[in-house]
Amino acid sequence: MLITAGACVALLTACTATTANTESGPGSAEDAAICPVPSPAANISDLPSGFKVGDLGVVTTVRKQHDFTSMVISTRESIREAFGHVHKLADQAGFTVLSSQNDGIDAEIFVKTPHGQGFVGMSEGSCGQVIAIVELPEPPK
């Protein structure tokens, strides 16, 4: 089962939450606290082979649930750049793009993999980054 739109919004909100900045000017201590450098996930060995998601940015979360691997990626690419990058990665992995849309502030790509259908959703984060949520089916056991 693919991640629902509501779950995507919840994940994106959690990954982009900010607090009010009382200091003015970029580079203040509050900016560093609000916009920390993304930390790589500890379990990147669980990434599916073939789809080189680490080439897109920093993989911050990897979770296996049911028959899917879910990943959250933070990238400094724009939505347009990340959208094109994901299309290229899908092609290199041998996936078929079933449908996609990009309206400039968020984008979705649905793919067919050898093991089923997957999804990549992208949205702008509050710190100028793009957050990508990737859901890919696991191979049968």
Image (cartoon, rainbow, N blue to C red):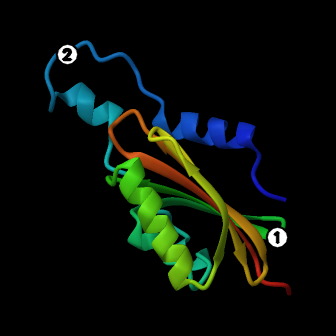
Where 123 falls versus 50 (above or below)? above
Where 24 falls versus 95 (above or below)? above
- How far apart marks 1 and 2 lie (CA) works out to 46 Å
Disc 1 is placed on an element classified as loop
Disc 2 is placed on an element classified as loop
* 93 or 13, nearer to the observer: 93
Query: Residue visible at 46% across and 74% down?
Result: 88
Query: Residue visible at 49% across and 63% down?
Result: 41
Report x, y in % for residue 85: 42, 66
Query: For the residue carrying disc 2, how many other residues have a C-alpha within 10 Å: few (<14), some (14-19), or many (20+)?
Result: few
* Amino acid type of the residue tagged 2 in the rendering: Glu
Report x, y in % for residue 57: 39, 63
Query: Residue visible at 78% across and 80% down?
Result: 115
* 10 or 124, nearer to the observer: 124
Report x, y in % for residue 117: 76, 69
Where 47 falls versus 77 (above or below)? below
Which numbered disc, 1 or 2, marks the residue closer to the eye?
Answer: 1
Query: For the residue carrying disc 1, how many other residues have a C-alpha within 10 Å: few (<14), some (14-19), or many (20+)?
Result: some
Q: Quadrant of the N terminus?
A: bottom right
Left or right of 62 on screen, residue 66? right
Are dots 1 and 2 in contact, CB under 8 Å?
A: no
Q: Which residue is mark 2?
A: 23
Q: Which residue is mark 1?
A: 67
* Amino acid type of the residue tagged 1 in the rendering: Asp
